[in-house]
Image (spheres, grey):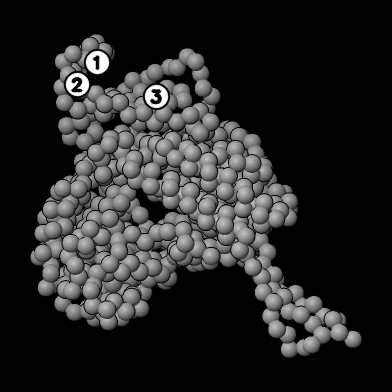
């Protein structure tokens, strides 16, 4: 999108949460949202322009992203490329269109794969130090443009601006980490059983990697994968989620500014309708050696089948259904704080957020009461650009409908709504607290991805573990206890890939991120994240002694 000295404004009125109206206009290259709250009779502009809307006190929230970062084309072989059609990107808080993005199809996807394959042959020859320096430059640019990138996330994803700022910091941290890991990819010299040979194990990049990412962390999920791939010497083709392509394209722009060579990083945005055909290319093309996917377990299974024909390397971070267990010995105040952090980040739309809350009977009433009061005092619904917002919308109406369905199912089976329970305008949901929940209810059987807290009362440690492990997924789990023996027992017994002990937030670039059971394959972040993009080659060096 090119900047223009003459900006065309299109003004739209959009009702949202009760008592508020969003007045939105678009201008190139800035998108501005005005949240209208209260009355201001002296606001003549709105009296003249909007006679049907009360004169109001206006606060201006502008995405205010520089033109170079507000990209709307695909990025292939170092060039910005248009497709034959475009698709809209919407603000989930208002439903208003933010931009129209090139709707890449199989042809563009194949071009990107070919470009990545050509670039691989030179990129893999670069030294570890050269790759490290370029990743560090990319990290520096993310840090420099932190606020602009955060605004993109807030407007296309819906999360509060403070959370978006945190995501950009988290996203950049993977580039920093893997810029350092690039220089720590070591092989091995293994003692040989024969005195005339040496046994060496070499680490080499696997090749072109297809990177398929979700909408809930539109920046961090890309850098966590791409940072590791580039550090190892691989090249990538990124297919971002159709809801949030703007963040991915901004990352591509900064990669270009950092000096990462053409073809090393490619981005092919596409609509929901074209996703299957683009995915088919990225998962079955013989030139692709590796697939890394974050998303639902159902989609992951489809991609695994596609990858099977050419026996590709695969990493998958799939669905979760995290238990959050509070034992009688827990510090209840800290447990409530952990529950708030784990459940309501990004309005409950994270793969590691707590879904099933298991509270031991001895502290059940106290925990529920304190959690209820914390929800009242800490959660404020609104557009993510508003400074006091702590809970934004869900990504779309389908997500809200799923939460409503789970609440309805639980109530029909005897659960009690202690707080919330209603869908508001658009895709906004009231944060909801349910008591009297049993394991027969839908909210305990499937991932919610929304601001719903179903609480199950339990009596014994064995009962809690049976409920926590009674699922076919195992990404993350959390529990609060001050009993050291119990901490070791439960941490080892929980069937998950990651455990938070007296802690509600797990993610950090230094730690291995991933699950067991049907929550995925492989690990991201940490030293093990690079290993997902490396092959081990055995070299037998003989004839060393006569």
Q: CA distance from mark 3 to mark 1?
A: 17 Å
Answer with mark 1 or mark 2, whichever residue precedes in sequence. Answer: 1
Q: Which mark is residue 26?
A: 3
Q: Which residue is mark 2?
A: 56
- View extreme (right): residue: 546
- Between 117 and 87, which is closer to the camera in this rendering? 117
Q: Which residue is mark 1?
A: 46
Q: CA distance from mark 3 to mark 2?
A: 20 Å
Answer with mark 3 or mark 1, whichever residue precedes in sequence. Answer: 3
Q: Which mark is residue 138?
A: none
Q: Is residue 214 shown above or below 9?
A: below
- Callout 1: SS: helix
Residue at 11% over, 55% down: 418
Q: Position of residue 147 (x, y in %)?
A: 41, 37
Q: Mark 1: few, some, or many residues within 10 Å (few <14, many ≥20)?
A: some
| Res 92 seen here | yes
- Callout 3: SS: strand
Residue at 59% over, 33% down: 82
Q: CA distance from mark 1 to mark 2?
A: 8 Å
Residue at 31% over, 35% down: 385
Q: Is residue 369 shown above or below 259?
A: below
Between disc 3 and disc 2, the foreground one is: 2
Q: Mark 3: few, some, or many residues within 10 Å (few <14, many ≥20)?
A: many
Q: Position of residue 324 (x, y in %)?
A: 26, 66
Check if mark 1's residue and mark 2's residue have beta carbons within 8 Å. yes
């Amino acid at each position: 999108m090119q900047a223009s000295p003459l900006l065309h404004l299109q003004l739209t009125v959009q009702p949202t949460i009760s008592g508020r109206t969003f007045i939105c206009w678009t201008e190139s290259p800035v998108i501005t949202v005005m949240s209208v709250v209260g009355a201001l009779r002296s606001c003549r502009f709105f009296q003249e322009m909007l006679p049907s809307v009360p004169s109001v006190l206006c606060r201006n929230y502008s995405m205010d992203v520089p033109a170079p970062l507000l990209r709307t084309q695909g990025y292939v072989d170092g060039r910005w490329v248009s497709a034959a059609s475009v698709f809209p990107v919407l603000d989930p808080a208002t439903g208003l269109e933010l931009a129209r993005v090139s709707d890449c199809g199989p042809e563009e996807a194949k071009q990107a794969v070919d470009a990545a394959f050509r670039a691989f042959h030179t990129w893999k020859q670069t030294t570890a130090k050269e790759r490290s320096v370029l990743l560090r430059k990319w990290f520096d640019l993310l840090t420099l443009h932190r606020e602009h990138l955060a605004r993109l996330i807030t407007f296309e994803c819906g999360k509060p601006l403070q959370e978006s700022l945190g995501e950009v910091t988290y996203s950049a941290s993977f580039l920093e980490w893997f810029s350092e890991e690039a220089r720590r990819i070591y092989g091995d010299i293994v003692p040989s059983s024969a005195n005339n040979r040496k046994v060496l194990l070499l680490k080499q990049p696997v090749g072109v990697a297809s990177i398929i990412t979700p909408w809930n962390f539109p920046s961090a999920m890309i850098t966590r994968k791409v940072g590791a791939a580039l550090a190892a010497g691989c090249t990538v083709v990124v297919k971002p989620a159709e809801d949030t392509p703007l963040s991915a394209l901004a990352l591509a722009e900064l990669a270009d500014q950092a000096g990462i060579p053409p073809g090393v990083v490619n981005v092919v945005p596409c609509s929901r309708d074209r996703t299957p055909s683009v995915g088919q290319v990225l998962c079955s093309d013989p030139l692709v050696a590796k697939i890394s996917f974050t998303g639902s377990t159902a989609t992951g299974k489809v991609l695994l089948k596609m990858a099977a024909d050419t026996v590709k390397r695969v990493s998958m971070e799939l669905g979760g259904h995290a238990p959050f267990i509070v034992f009688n010995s827990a510090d209840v105040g800290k447990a409530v704080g952990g529950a708030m952090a784990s459940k309501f980040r990004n309005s409950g739309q994270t793969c590691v957020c707590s879904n099933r809350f298991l509270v031991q009977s001895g502290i059940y009433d106290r925990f529920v009461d304190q959690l209820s009061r914390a929800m009242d005092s800490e959660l404020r619904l609104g557009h993510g650009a508003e400074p006091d917002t702590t809970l934004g919308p869900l990504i779309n109406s389908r997500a809200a409908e799923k939460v409503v369905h789970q609440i309805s199912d639980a109530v029909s089976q005897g659960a009690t709504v202690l707080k919330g329970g209603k869908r508001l305008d658009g895709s906004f949901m009231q944060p909801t607290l349910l008591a009297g929940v049993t394991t027969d209810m839908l909210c305990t059987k499937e991932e919610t991805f929304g601001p719903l807290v179903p609480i199950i009362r339990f009596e014994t440690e064995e009962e809690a573990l049976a409920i926590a492990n009674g699922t076919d997924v195992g990404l993350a789990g959390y529990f609060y206890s001050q009993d050291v023996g119990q901490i070791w027992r439960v941490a080892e017994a929980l069937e998950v890939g990651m455990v938070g002990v007296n802690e509600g937030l797990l993610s950090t670039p230094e730690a291995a991120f991933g699950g067991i059971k049907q929550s995925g394959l492989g690990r991201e972040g940490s030293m093990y994240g690079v290993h997902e993009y490396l092959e081990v080659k055995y070299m037998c060096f003989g004839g060393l002694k006569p």
